[in-house]
Amino acid sequence: MISGYKFLETKTEQLSGIKMITIPTLKTTRLIIRPLNEKDIDFLFNHYNQEEISRYTLISFNSIDEVKAFLGQYTAKSDMRKFKEGIELRSTQQLIGTVTFLNWSKKDRCAEIGYDLSKEYWGKGFMYEALEVFIRFGFEVMNLNRIEATTNVRNERSRKVLTRLGFIQEGILRQKYRFRGKFSDEIIFSILREEWETRGIQGMQDKS
């Protein structure tokens, strides 16, 4: 068991071609981070069609078939450079958001993290709690050296949670994405393994 979280179960499919690990199910005090499946399609359709979510994730759907195709990108055995998991409340077993690793490079030991949370759960510390355990999995199990994140320049909540987690702002990617006919500027953040380890040691010292 890794300090800070534990495995509840794992999918049988291994992340082939990258590293011999399994897609995790993790738990925190209030949350379960688990693989998505077809039972989550209705949630994903409604979730990403909320304006507050789509404006920053740049994701929206016109049909359930589009959701199925989207989910298939993260569950296809042929491309395990990325995987997406649901953020579930332990108390109600209700999905409230997602967290993702993208562009996982074994050679460079680098991946990009993505995340979203339903509006009614903003401001309660759920995203920090989910990202903290997911990032730890990235460094301690996936053996990453660098985790990147990009966020819209107007997304103040996202910037704050990344900063609180120890991410460093590196710069602005001008007109990085195009969504609904408009280009958006994105801020790129990163955290290195050594920074995460130092942050963890400092946290233990602060509690002692």
Image (cartoon, grey):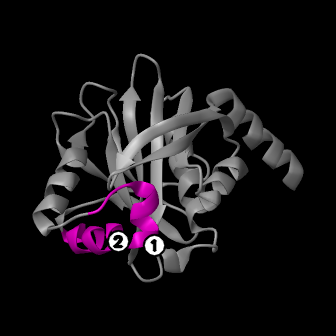
Q: How crowded is mark 1: few (under 14 residues within 10 Å), some or many (20 or more)?
A: some
Q: How crowded is mark 2: few (under 14 residues within 10 Å), some or many (20 or more)?
A: many
Picture coordinates of residue 7, whole percent (x, y): 43, 54
Residue extending farthest front: 181
The residue located at (42%, 83%) in the rendering is 92
Foreground pick, 142 / 104: 104
Q: Which residue is the site of mark 1?
A: 118
Label 1, label 2: how many angstroms apart (C-alpha)? 7 Å
The residue located at (21%, 34%) in the rendering is 79
Give the mark nearest the N terminus, 1 or 2: 2
Residue 47 - label: 2
Residue 87 visible in image: no
The kind of residue on which mark 2 rests is His
Residue 194 - label: none
Asked whether residue 41 is drawn in magenta, I would say yes
Q: How many marks?
A: 2
Residue 18 visible in image: yes
In-image side of 65 versus 155 (left or right): left
Cβ atoms at labels 1 and 2 below 8 Å apart: yes
Quarter-of-image position of residue 59: bottom left
Q: Give the range drawn in magenta.
A: 39-60
- Disc 1 is placed on an element classified as loop
